[in-house]
Amino acid sequence: MSSSFGEKLKVTIFGASHGSHIGVVLEGLDAGEVIDQEALAQFMQRRAPKKNMLSTQRREADTVTFVSGVLDDKTSGSPLCALIQNTDAHSKDYANLEDVPRPSHADYTARLRFGEAVDLRGGGHFSGRLTAPLCIAGGIALQLLARKGIEIYAHLKSVGEGEDSPLDVLTPDIHLLKVAQGRAVPMVSEARAREVEALIKTLRQEGDSVGGVIECFALGFPRGKGNPLFDSIESNLAKVLFGVSGVKGVSFGSGFDGVRHRGSEENDPFSVDDQGQIITKKNNSGGIQGGISNGMPIYFQVAMKPTPSIAKIQESISLSKNIPTDLRIQGRHDPCIAIRAIPVIEAVCALVLLEFLL
């Protein structure tokens, strides 16, 4: 089971949704890096379930405990290990899933790969719960990048048919992105955020769910970082992004929309700014060309599927009897996982980009 990524900066995620703990090991950090524990806790709370109808009703404090690699709020140079205790797991809600797999979930394929011994309580190691320790590592990476003048922000670009207000991809408004982070539905447009919030609440009452698209910006990343072919910025980001539960698509810059344009429309013309720096007049490339950063804002989109665990009755099979059967899922689940995935996407972006600077 592969639960690690990175070479110079290696991240390993461990634990299961209903196990005693989940955690992360982070290797490759220099000694003496200060970790702002308060800022890290605030970042973790952005991913944590809220006391509203937009997220799961599972209540976890997600308090971070450093086991090694941190002394007096500074990295010690040894592998950093951090734990989160699981305190609100209801495993009995998942008892029927031992025989009846959830449609579009990993229950069936996990059994095919690992056999009957696999832990599928609450989704086990396949659960979105494992994005919490990912946010520990990413939250630390965000702090290190900020000290280098690099900032990363994401927002909910769309949910269902509801599209957020577009941002200027040459100079994204950081203030608008920060304000969006504080909303129950993290969109730049307050009016659209209210519409989407109403939609999600309705779907929850109906026992259904909805997907969404997250857009992420990395600002201030230096030019000339990355590699061509299989070690590019895009290929490294895409690999880790697809490791986040629920991600079904990734695009960079203008992405799939750009294929509708002609080359004369899609190309990013070069220019020189007032400081004599080479820039582009457009940014359809998303700040990356040939796998290497060009100094413009890096931005990409991530498609999150609708939560497969829904309250509606669904068609499944009994594995023991090998016959079709109906499934009613118990437990507590997000009606739109894209909302709480926003800081997770920021965390992934921070970890991948930080490695290119080491």
Image: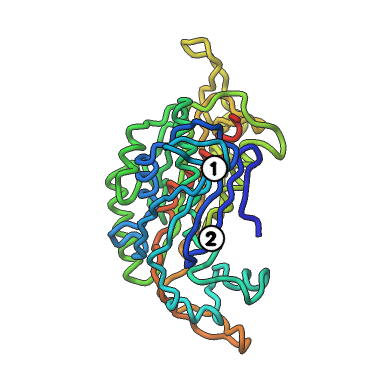
Would you say 164 lies left or right of 51 here? right
Q: Residue at x 56, y 51 (%)?
A: 249
Within 10 angstroms of label 1, few (less than 14), some, or many (20 or more) residues? few
Q: Which residue is nearer to you in this view: 74 or 269?
A: 74
Q: Which residue is mark 2?
A: 15
Q: Which residue is nearer to you in this view: 268 or 188?
A: 188
Coordinates of residue 172 in the picture (x, y in percent): 41, 31
Would you say 204 lies left or right of 260 here? left
Q: Quadrant of the C terminus?
A: top right
Mark yes or no: residue 284 visible.
Answer: no
Q: Residue at x 31, y 65 (%)?
A: 202
Of label 1 and label 2, which has the lower sequence position? 2
Q: Quadrant of the N terminus?
A: bottom right
Mark 2 secondary-structure assignment: strand
Say what amino acid the circle numbered 1 marks: Asp
Q: Residue at x 44, y 55 (%)?
A: 84
